[in-house]
Amino acid sequence: IATSRSFNSTLEGRATMAPAAKEFYEDQKNLNKLCNFLRGADGPAVREAIMMDKRVYYIKGEKLVNFMVEPKKGTKWPKELPRFSSRPDAIAVCKELCNIQYIHRSEKVAKGELEVARVRDFDESAYFTWIYEGDMTNKNLMTTALIIGFLCCTCFPIWPNFLKVFVWYMSVSLLIFIFFLVTLRALVFLFVWIIGYEMWFLPNLFDESLGFCESFVPVISCEKTKDGQLMYRVGVSVAFFSFCYWAVTQPSEFDGFVKGQGDFIKDLYAGTLLSDMSQKDKENIDKPKMPSLEDLLKKLDSEDEEEKELSEEEAAEALLDSLVEDSEDIDEDEE
């Protein structure tokens, strides 16, 4: 009897929940909240594809309905959104998403390529592409920050001097940090690779196909090396330890190398790495470039010299012409 009562209460709860959920999602704002959740990090997994020369995200209708009725384990369903008690309720909402063009039906034409399907009705066996992009507040803020940053970079010549020095120090520090990070990753990989394993610190750091946060995941990857690399590992280990032996037994040359690297970093921070003329141009970058009095006088002197050279050439040409004419007259008189 207790079991039948609990079963009946469950049915009554589902029966009362279904109309409430249906009425709740008839409101456009509530439907947008549901789509924001489905398009968020806690939503169902989606795949990427190219459609009409644009990268899109798509999902199979069955997986979308399954997630709406029974979310995956560990999913935090928003408290302000009522749960779906049956598949028909979830399918009804999916049909509404198709009608308002939040999603549209697609067909696969090739690997990683989609096209818009002629049939627009919702079907669990079909694929559906997300058109709804979610809350655009963060994207708009990032776009605004990007525009402001671009304008600030273009106005760099009129920045105060202390800001220029700050940017210079930050740039140099970032450059040195990246250099040492790359060197550290390479050394760690070399040491472990000699033993027989391939271990990378931040293996996806320079993967351009991943996003910013995804580039730092995983932190460490370790795999056993492939067969047939024993001779290469032995040769690299011999060369590396030979270099270490040379560095230890030749302290004068290695110390000079270390001192040179230290001087390089000091000059880099001090801004004196460039030549004096380049350093002078860097300091006078904000000053208008106008010719000085000495430059003007030199220019006038050069023009006068050019005129004198031209006049001398003209005189020489006139003398030659007169000599030619005299010789012609003499020849005529003799005849």
Image (cartoon, helix red, strand yellow):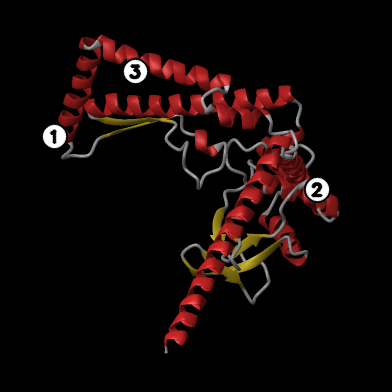
Q: Residue at 50% across / 69% down in the picture?
A: 320
Q: Nearer the viewer, residue 145 or 16?
A: 145
Give the labeled residue for mark 2: 16
Residue type, mark 1 in image: Met
Of tags 3 and 1, the one toward the viewer is 3
Using residue 274 as the reference point, say whether residue 96 is left or right of it: right
Q: Where does the image place residue 28, in percent across and percent down from the top left?
A: 84, 54
Using residue 90 as the reference point, say whether residue 239 is left or right of it: left
| Mark closer to the chain start, 3 or 2 | 2
Q: Nearer the viewer, residue 101 or 185?
A: 185
Residue type, mark 2 in image: Thr
Look at the image and tell me in which quarter the N terminus lies: top right
Of tags 3 and 2, the one toward the viewer is 3
Q: Where does the image place residue 101, in percent across and percent down from the top left?
A: 74, 64
Residue type, mark 3 in image: Phe
* Residue 220 image-quadrant placement: top left
Q: In this view, which residue lies farthest toward the left?
A: 231
Label number found at residue 231: 1
Vertical arrangement, residue 85 with respect to residue 52, above or below: above
**Could you tell me how far apart the alpha carbons at marks 3 and 1 are, in whole angstroms?**
31 Å
